[in-house]
Image: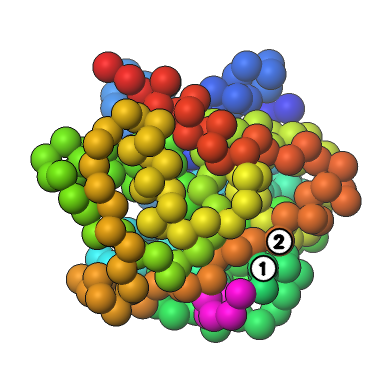
Amino acid sequence: MKVFVTGVCGQLGHDVMKELQKRGHEAVGSDLAPAEDSGYIALDITDAEAVRRVLLEQKPDAVIHCAAWTAVDAAEDCEEKVRAINAGGTGHIAKVCRALDCKILYISTDYVFDGQGEQPWEPDCKAYAPLNVYGQTKLEGEQAVAELLEKFFVVRIAWVFGKNGSNFIKTMLNVGKKYDTLRVVKDQVGTPTYTLDLSRLLVDMVETEKYGFYHATNEGGYISWYEFACEIFRQAGYPTKVIPVTTEEYGLSKAARPFNSRLDKSKLIAAGFKPLPTWQDALRRYLKETED
């Protein structure tokens, strides 16, 4: 199978490419400005004609669309640009996939919901109410895919970490080296997602025709950012003390954040897909993979 991957310079796209290659698929990677010697295609997904030209040239059997604007706070000041990437760029890709009769797997987020309550969000729930520009534009990307195509997967993820990029774990470890005590929010709850584990699931999915909306994070239960930070320092052997605070007490964020990022993953099991390992195990493997 020939698979075209966008956003290969990011955390997830990097691991998806490796997983595809490991399984013997023909993987073609693209990003906005990849290194010249990377072998990846330079592609601005906001350029409709460029998207059309590249995809018609490559004629993939499937597209795994990882490229996105993901800087949540910065998005509040760049709404037009963010929409051009997350919604417009996704629409451009979906239109060419339709012309090619090509399946697409679109990576989305729990931010399409309002983040209230304590019940896990189900993948086919339509109670959309994004709290910020990032969530709204990712929702518009979902809608473009679902309206234009029948052969699609929309996979919502949360709290992503991977080797090839910035993430909460790296931030905690860097700050933990400088300070004895940290304040971390306790009232935002979800489950971490390791890109190495997620990439395996995404390739499993794109090898099938079990289309639809799905939720995917690691197993291991729902936790707060505070609890995640405590486990990071425990596993890393840092003596850093973590103080739990509310989102209001913490302040700082320009964009509103969801309190409830719990995602119901039962549909994955029902469809026959193998669940991801626990986030505790994923953290252990990530720390080992990234140790100096």
Q: Count the marks: how many? A: 2
Residue at image position (27%, 33%) is 238
Q: What residue type is labelled 1?
A: Pro
For label 1, the crowd category at 10 Å Cα-Cα, with few meaning under 14, some 14 to 19 and many 20 or more, is some
Image coordinates of residue 32 in percent, x first then y, are: 35, 43
Instruction: Tell me, yes or no, whether the two marked residues, 1 and 2, touch with CB atoms within 8 Å.
Output: yes
Mark 1 lies on a secondary structure that is: loop
> Is 107 situated above or below 247?
above
Residue at image position (29%, 24%) is 36
Magenta-tinted stretch: 113-118
Left or right: where does residue 5 sit relative to residue 219?
Answer: left
Q: Name the residue under label 1.
A: 120
Residue at image position (67%, 68%) is 120
Image coordinates of residue 8 in percent, x first then y, are: 44, 35
The scheme the figure's colours follow is rainbow
For label 2, the crowd category at 10 Å Cα-Cα, with few meaning under 14, some 14 to 19 and many 20 or more, is some
Image coordinates of residue 52 in percent, x first then y, are: 54, 50
Extreme residue toward the left, this view: 178
Whole-number angstrom distance, CA of label 1 to CA of label 2: 5 Å
What secondary structure predominates along the stretch shown in magenta? loop
Left or right: where does residue 73 sit relative to residue 41?
Answer: left
Is residue 117 one of those drawn in magenta? yes
Residue at image position (73%, 47%) is 103
Q: Mark 2 points at which residue?
A: 264
Mark 2 lies on a secondary structure that is: loop
> Is 184 situated above or below 180?
below
Q: What residue type is labelled 2?
A: Asp
Name the one closer to the observer, 245 or 118: 245
